[in-house]
Amino acid sequence: MPATATLAELELELLTQYRGKTRRSRELHARASQVMPGGDTRTGTFHPPYPLVMAWGDGCRLGDEDGNEYFDFLGNFTSLIHGHAPARVNAAIQDQLRRGSAHGSPTALMTVLAERLTTRVPSVERVRFCNSGTEAAMFAIRAARAYTGRALIVKMEGGYHGSYDPVQVALSGRYGESDGLGLSPGAVGEVIAIPFNDLDQARLALERHRAEVAAVIVEPVMVAAGIIPAEPEFLHGLRQVTGDIGALLICDEVATLRLDWGGAQQRYGITPDLTCFGKIIGGGLPAGAFGGRADVMAVYDPTGPGTIAHSGTYNGNALAMAAGIATLDLYPPPVVQQLNQAGDELRGRLQAACDRAGLPASLTGLGSLIGFHPVRGPVRNAHQSAGADRRIIRALHLALLLRGIFSASRQMYVLSTAMLDDTAEPIARFESVFEEAVGMIADAARGEGTVS
């Protein structure tokens, strides 16, 4: 790639190369745009000028419709803990498919997966299944409101818990959307947003509304906001103050269950009242779950008086249950530790690469989840990452794609167990490609005076 003087020139050159390598994706995106707004049904997968259209996935590798191959450092946004099409998970799905996919009645598999979750996560005494992390948050919040008789929900600024109206508040312009656009004014009025990792502000807000707050919902690591870990004292403080005011603590482990045998709550040593699950518990198929204290979850028990109806055509469907069981069984504590160690070591090496290049950047995360922020650290909340130069993020994304590394356009990097045994050493390859890319970007930034 020729030397470039500015970030704008670099981005233009990268876009030209991207278009040249992905003509079939461009054609398919144009076709899709005739029947779907924006040519897709997931805002998070879109990036300018158009997203890649993938043809296959195998282990930690992906192939697009143009014949280009990539190492996959996204894993369908953390859900594919074992990569694409793992043999044991595929076998479980195929075996169950011969018996039917969904039966309109409970199956034994549903109980087995529920037992897996309650064994791994002691705070979860009872669990119910749904079809997504969005639904898990929605039903957990409703349980908290029903149990406490209160309406207010407290969430973190920039925290993402799906597309349910109350948790869409205060997303800090994620993906460029306008906060509040299309949301119910009533739902917005029942949410208080507070800064992540600011215990003083949390205490003030909760004490001010102590008789009205039903629950605080929080991710132990804010994933969509940039893989920003909670500080231990912040989570422990939330646990204490919610208990003091009679509110519930909802831990969103949709993406963070992977971080320990018992999820991030085990790693942090906290015991929430309710927990949301998704991503890896479906083994690559759509699945969600929510659970927690037996007395709180009793609001969904149809054998009791005045309880909440909770149904869904595909809740606990046999295919997702079979895939989830196989996936969790392939992720025992030694494998969790091995994957987390690989992620922690990679994060440190990526930070060192940025430092050597002279590119101001903060690599955040925990274990197998890594976030890149082109800002001087530390990054403790969504506001501290909001000032990032988006041109650097766009350029890095394109530079990685052109070198065979697939990642989220917002620059989130996710490891899978499939990388640990791949003879091509994808982690080492990613590190090498990343260093080359940030060096090129730092030179361009210096060329325009953005970086001294």
Image (cartoon, rainbow, N blue to C red):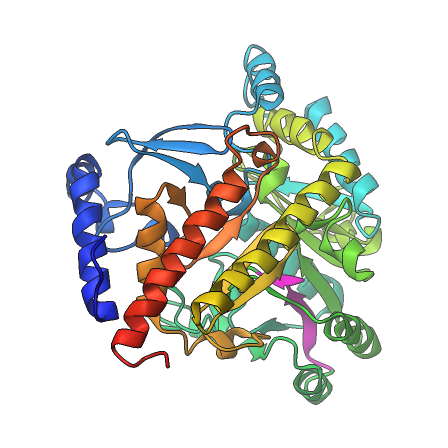
- Left or right, residue 79 beside residue 298: left
Please state, as top left, top right, bottom left or bottom right, where the C terminus lies in the image: bottom left
Q: Can you give x and y, in whole percent of width and height, for residue 63 in the image? A: 35, 31
Asked whether residue 217 is drawn in magenta, I would say yes
* Residue span colored magenta: 211-222
Question: Which residue lies most toward the top here?
Answer: 98
Q: Nearer the viewer, residue 47 or 94?
A: 47
- Left or right, residue 297 beside residue 388: right
Residue at image position (36%, 41%) is: 404
Q: Nearer the viewer, residue 31 or 52?
A: 52
**Is residue 198 among what the camera can see?**
yes
Q: Nearer the viewer, residue 438 or 84?
A: 438
On screen, residue 363 above or below 376: above
Q: Can you give x and y, in whole percent of width and height, for residue 183 in the image? A: 40, 68
**Is residue 176 among what the camera can see?**
no
Residue at image position (43%, 66%) is: 357
Asked whether residue 315 is drawn in magenta, I would say no
**Residue 48's image quarter?**
bottom left
Which SS type dominates the magenta stretch? strand
Q: How many marks?
A: 0
- Left or right, residue 270 beside residue 39: right
Q: Nearer the viewer, residue 419 or 314?
A: 419
Q: Can you give x and y, in whole percent of width and height, for residue 248 in the image? A: 75, 67
On screen, residue 366 above or below 282: below
Q: Can you give x and y, in whole percent of width and height, for residue 342 in the image? A: 64, 46
